[in-house]
Image (tube, rainbow, N blue to C red):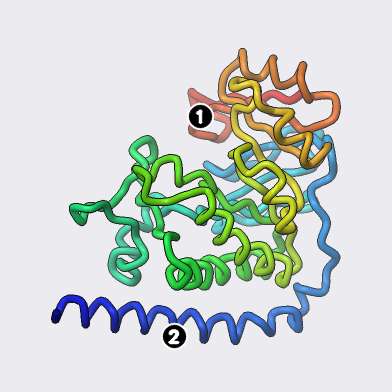
């Protein structure tokens, strides 16, 4: 009974903090950075994916995506990468210290982890937790706007696929329903990151474009272009996938070849090509 009481008090406090955040965040439209027109990345623009490291883009690039803590690319349309569904590497300790109740746990009380990237999944399984997490991520989105980014990509929308059945696509969509207006209030376009399983649900919520990874490799690029037209960016991590994506949608959408760690020029693994 004591444990339940403590948990209930923690949940109530989290909800109260989130309510306070949204009361403040509702005034975001009054801030100068929210006055700019919202526009998705230009269709079929030459793109570079720089979420691993920021560097001077190759000649001809007009759109880049960078981590939210990186500087915007001067003179270019810059998308802000936000890990909205999982803990960013290096930030797990902060989440555990400040918001441990918002991290997903299995039936034995262990964290549910995306093993490929060693990231703990955020617990978006209930309305209160979604609201609390959206309050935190909404603050990051506001920061992207203040720093001069023009759009945001919330990564790991498909974290439910790695949740051992604890999360659903409906949970993901319900959380997105909070992030979309948060981005738009800040004057930013917001993109769907991966998961063709959403169909048109993301667009119907107000998502403005899509960023896919390896859609050529998995033969699903048209699953994005059928929904978002030319406002699709695809990042391929294999040569075969890059060739397939270029043939499938390269004439109308942005397709690039990058190395899996998205490193900078000078790295032994750096790769970049565009079609």
Q: Are marks 1 and 2 in contact (CB under 8 Å)?
A: no
Q: Position of residue 8 (x, y in %)?
A: 29, 80
Tell me, for residue 16, which label it has, or none: 2
Q: How far apart are labels 1 and 2 at the CA level? A: 40 Å
Label 2 Cα crowd, 10 Å radius (few <14 / some 14-19 / many 20+): few
Give SS at disc 1. loop
Of label 1 and label 2, which has the lower sequence position? 2
The correct choice, above or below, for 184 with respect to 241 in the image is: below
Which of the two marks, 1 or 2, is nearer to us in this view?
2
Left or right: where 20 falls relative to 143: left
Residue at the limit of the structure toward the left, as seen here: 2
Residue 72, image x, y percentages: 68, 55
Q: Quadrant of residue 38?
A: bottom right
Secondary structure, mark 2, is helix
Query: Which residue is depicted at the point 37% across and 50% down?
Result: 166
Residue at the image position 14 percent from the left and 79 percent from the top: 1
| Camera-nearest residue between 5 and 234 | 5
In this view, the residue in front, 262 or 135, is 135
Left or right: where does residue 130 sit relative to residue 80?
A: left
Please state the horizontal and vertical placement of residue 71, each as a whole percent of the image.
63, 56
Residue 150, image x and y in percent? Answer: 74, 58
Q: What residue is shown with label 1?
A: 260
């Amino acid at each position: 009974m004591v444990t339940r009481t403590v948990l209930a008090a923690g949940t109530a406090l989290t909800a109260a903090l989130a309510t306070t955040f949204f009361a403040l965040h509702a005034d975001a439209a009054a801030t100068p950075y929210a006055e700019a027109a919202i526009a998705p990345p230009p269709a079929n623009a030459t793109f570079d994916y720089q979420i691993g490291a920021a560097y001077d883009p190759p000649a001809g690039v007009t759109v880049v995506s960078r981590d939210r803590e990186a500087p915007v690319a001067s003179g270019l349309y810059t998308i802000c990468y936000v890990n909205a569904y999982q803990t960013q590497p290096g930030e797990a300790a902060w989440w555990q210290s400040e918001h441990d109740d918002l991290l997903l746990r299995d039936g034995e009380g262990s964290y549910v982890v995306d093993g490929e990237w060693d990231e703990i999944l955020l617990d978006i399984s209930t309305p209160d937790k979604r609201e609390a997490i959206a309050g935190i991520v909404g603050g990051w989105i506001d920061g992207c706007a203040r720093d001069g980014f023009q759009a945001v990509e919330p990564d790991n929308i498909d974290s439910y696929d790695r949740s051992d059945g604890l999360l659903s696509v409906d949970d993901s969509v319900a959380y997105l329903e909070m992030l979309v207006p948060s981005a738009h209030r800040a004057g930013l376009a917001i993109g769907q990151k991966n998961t063709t399983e959403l169909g048109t649900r993301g667009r119907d919520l107000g998502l403005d474009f899509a960023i896919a990874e390896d859609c050529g490799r998995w033969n699903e690029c048209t699953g994005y272009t059928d929904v978002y037209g030319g406002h699709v960016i695809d990042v391929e991590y294999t040569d075969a996938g890059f060739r397939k994506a270029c043939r499938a949608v390269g004439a109308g959408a942005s397709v690039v070849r990058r190395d899996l760690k998205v490193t900078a020029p000078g790295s032994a693994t750096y790769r970049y090509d565009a079609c």
